[in-house]
Image (cartoon, helix red, strand yellow):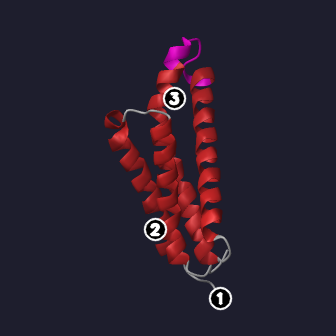
Amino acid sequence: MKKYVLLKLIGLAIVTMITLVVISFLEVAVYSYLINPGQEQNVYEAHANSSAPYISGIFGFIIFFLVAHYWKKREYPNVFRLIILFPIIYVLLDIIIITAAGVKWSDFFLIFTIANAAKFLGCLLGYKLTNYTH
């Protein structure tokens, strides 16, 4: 992972975002077909808008934890630097995408902060709770 670290981290952040969107779509599908079927489309859109940040925070924590755990277990060089850079790059990309989408930040800032803090926490805990096994 020494070469092109920044590009690899950007790619990983994009793959992580796509994964979280897919999980969010799956959650809305389960909600619309199994939990609350037969509603108008706007009910499901409202549910997707309200549940997506929670899905991002919960599953983002898990993904970031597992990535950090993997890196530390594999003894990547400068692993702590990767642990710090990965969520920073993710958040920067998230800000760019959300801003480009025209989201009203005043309605979204608190949950955005909480969801991304969960990702940072996941990364740090994945690092701290993983022991080297030689």
Q: Look at label 3 and name its amino acid.
A: Ala
Residue where numbered disc 2 is placed: 124
For the magenta stretch, what is the residue range? 34-43
Q: Where is residue 93 in the image (x, y as percent from the top left)?
A: 52, 51
Alpha-carbon neighbours of circle 1 within 10 Å: few (<14), some, or many (≥20)?
Answer: few
Apparent side of residue 32 relative to residue 85 in the rendered image (left or right): right
Q: Give the residue at the far bottom of this rendering.
A: 134
Q: Residue at x 60, y 59 (%)?
A: 10
Q: Is residue 130 above or below residue 25?
A: below
**Residue 126 seen in render:** no
Residue where numbered disc 1 is placed: 134
First along the sequence among labels 3 and 1:
3
Q: Position of residue 81 (x, y in %)?
A: 50, 75
Q: How far apart are marks 3 and 2 (CA)?
A: 29 Å
Residue where numbered disc 3 is placed: 48
Task: Find out whether the residues at labels 3 and 2 contact each other: C-beta distance under 8 Å.
Answer: no
Label 2 or label 1, whichever lies nearer to me, is 2
Q: Look at label 1 and name its amino acid.
A: His
Q: Which residue is drawn at 44% across and 60% down?
A: 120
